[in-house]
Structures are given as C-alpha cells and as structure tokens.
Amino acid sequence: MQQPYGVPYCRKISMNHFTRQGGGLYCESVPLSRIAEREGTPLYVYSRATLERHFKAFDGAFAGVEHLTCYSVKANSNIAVLRLFGRLGSGVDVVSGGEILRARKAGIAPGRIVYSGVGKTCTEIELALDSDILMFNVESAQELELINRVAAGKGTRARISLRVNPDVDPQTHPYISTGLKKNKFGIGMDDAFDAYVHAAALPGVDVVGIDCHIGSQIIAVGPFVDALARVKAFVQRLHDQGITIRMLDLGGGLGITYDAEIPPEPVQYARAIIDEMAGMDCTLILEPGRCLVGNAGCLVTRVQYTKSTAVKNFVIVDAAMNDLLRPSLYEAHHDVLHVNRAEGPGIQADIVGPICESGDFFARGRDIIQPEQGDLLAIMSAGAYGFSMASNYNSRLRASEVLVDGSDYHVIRSRETFEDLVRGETIPACLD
C-alpha cells in the first residue's frame, strides 16, 4: 500500500511524492534503491511532480494580485530545476553573476530576473545591465554609486530598488536572520529615506521599487506582516516626497517542516500579505526558495560501516558534510529513513560521514531502524541548500543529481570525476 511521507503542504509535504510502497521508499513511481544501484551514491533525488505542485500552490495563492514569483536560485541552482520553474511562469532572484548565467542558460527571460546580494562586483553589474534584467536590489550607498556610474557610462539607466532593513526579528536561526539592525543586509530605515531621495536624482538609475527580506526558514506569518507594515508606511512617505514605488519585493523566507515545525500554508501567508498591502498600488515580487524545493528532494547515501563504542553507536555513510552542510552548520534536523525497510529493530546512533571533522554528521543520538553495512539511507528534506552548498572538501567528488519524472528519471548533473577535481590546477615548471 502506498503511504505518503508526511502531511500538509510545507510540512513534510502532503503529496510530496516520496512514498513507501511495499516497505521500500519511492520517489514518484521509481524506487530509490533502483536509482542508487544504477547511478551510485551519494546522490540527490528530486521529484518533478513535487516541484511543480509546490510552485503552483505558492504562486496560485497570490493569484488575486499583480505579482511575480521569482524563485531564489541559491536554494537549488541546477539549471533543470530553473527550467522547470521557468516553464511554470517563474522569474528568479539571483545573488551573483554566475546565477544570472545559470538563469539565462535555463531560458529565464532577463525581464524576470531580480539581482540581490550585498557584494555585487563591477563585472557582475555590467553583466546584469547588458542582460537588461528587471531590477537591482541595492544594499548599500556605495553599491548605489557604483551601479549609477556603470550604467551612466553605458548610456543607460539601471532599474533599482533599495533593500531596506526594517529591524524585525524573524525568529529563526541567527545565521539566516537578515532583517535586524546588526545584520549585514540592506540599508537601515533611518538612512533609507535620504538614500532614496539621492537615488532619484542620479542620472544612471531609475527608482522603481523597494525591497525587504528579513530571513529564512520563518515559520510564522507575524514577522512578515510586521515588516510589511513598516515598509508600507515608508512607501507612503516616499510618495509624499514625489517618489513613486511601482514594485514591492518582499523577498522569501517561508519555512518548511524538517522536524516539528508547523509553518503556515501558502494561502495563509498570501492572505496576510495581501490584506496588509491594501491601498498599495504596487506589483508584488516574491522570492520563495526553500518552500518550493526543500521537501522535493532527498540525499541517498550508502552505509559503509557500523561501529559501537562504550558510549555510542555510529553509522558511517558515504555522504558527508561536503554534500549536505546544514546539519553541521546549523545543527539542523533532517529525517533519516531506511530506503528498503519501513520496520525493523531500532537503534540509537549518530549518522556520520567520512570527513576528518567531528562536525561531519547528519544526525546525532537519532532513533532509526538498525542499518547494516551496505544498506541505503535517505536524508530527507534535502532539496534546498543541499547540493548548492556542496564543496570538494577532503578532495571529495560532488554528488550527482537526478530528477524523477513519473516512472522515469533523468541525471541532471553527472557525478564529478577525479579529472574534474583537478581541472584548472597546474604544477609550475619551478617544481619540475
């Protein structure tokens, strides 16, 4: 009997298309064990049906207002994922020149690209201008001056918004909080008004919007509404100054369930935002990332060894912190499921990787079905900030990525080779 892994939309997500069938774990109609045997491990597996469902649920919740959903590329930057969302009508939020190039490679129209990030270089600004992107989200006074100078030098005007920092506590992990005064992002509300007045007088920029992003993995509507209320009052002040705001970028940040979190459904989130926007004549821009892709993917890994000490059991797998950094970086929870069995004797263990760091773990003190050497495990909710944060630490090859489509699957990133690992490196003649 087919049983869904988890329940409502952003919670594990009902109909997230990871299911148990006859005890085995499937993605859509494909057993994860089959993919792992053919493609090797570790590997990322994504469900096309889940990605599409999540985008439609989120984007559709805002159908009553003029809006543009711009998927946050940093969450999962594979060009196949970008193409899939682009075909559904998505734009993208990017934070580097590389992400602009990825978006263009995936077929995203420049007029649907919003460029955020605190450290844009001159070369990246030129690339964005040459591409004629929709808008820059400007994060500092010096960045504003550079964009103006580069655009004026090209004889054009850059469409910009300023990212204002509303000093709202998003009640999330401090590393992914972005809207407090102490964070590096945006321009404080106290300084933003003068910055807008100055920007409006510059020859190389066209002030079209305002941007606000308070953090990631937010599981309550309240912080979004509080931030929007402050931005709304600020927009009215700009209007009184004769500065018209046509685009309101509220960023992303809506969380998902990794463990016991209960985030709002997209319709609840949208209703609160739309109600608070009453009276504003702006196109709403939204930048969801994690809530679209997080529970649409898992990391499949094989057990290499099991061992016990006087105080602890260890399950050593072939995936590591270089493949999925979140547990090590944030002590984040990810469910770990046995791929082939839904029942069996239990054990409490640390699930760890082979990297030479004590922080190389996926779970600690976790109650799981006791695995044997060679068994497959699935680390769930790994579709966001998984491969996109991967590295070659310890000279490990980065994993492959697979997109499941019904009863078929496609390799959308080949596993790296040792030749890939050293490409670009040379031994100089002085060492011969």
Image (spheres, helix red, strand yellow):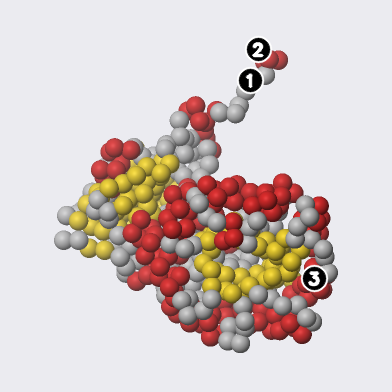
For label 3, the residue is 200
Q: Give the mark toward the camera: 1 or 3.
A: 3
- Farthest residue, direction bottom: 279
**CA gap, disc 3 to disc 2?**
59 Å
* Camera-nearest label, 3 or 2: 3
Image quadrant in which you'd find residue 257: bottom left
Tell me the amino acid under the disc marked 2: Asp
* Residue 270 place in picture, x, y as percent: 48, 78
- Residue drawn at (47%, 58%), measured in percent from left and top? 86
**Residue occupied by mark 1:** 427
Is residue 83 in sight in this rendering? Answer: yes
Q: Nearer the viewer, residue 133 or 221?
A: 133
In the displayed structure image, the side of residue 180 where residue 397 appears, left or right:
left
How crowded pointer 2 is (Cα within 10 Å; few <14, some 14-19, many 20+) is rated as few
Amino acid type, label 3: Ala
- The number of numbered badges drawn on the structure is 3
Q: Residues within 10 Å of mark 3 (few under 14, many from 20)?
A: some
Residue 350 image point, x, y percent? 39, 50
Q: Is residue 379 left or right of residue 280?
A: left
Q: Residue at x 28, y 38 (%)?
A: 37
Q: Earlier in the sequence, mark 1 or mark 3?
A: 3
In-image side of 145 versus 280 (left or right): right
Q: Quadrant of the N terminus?
A: bottom left
Disc 2 target residue = 432
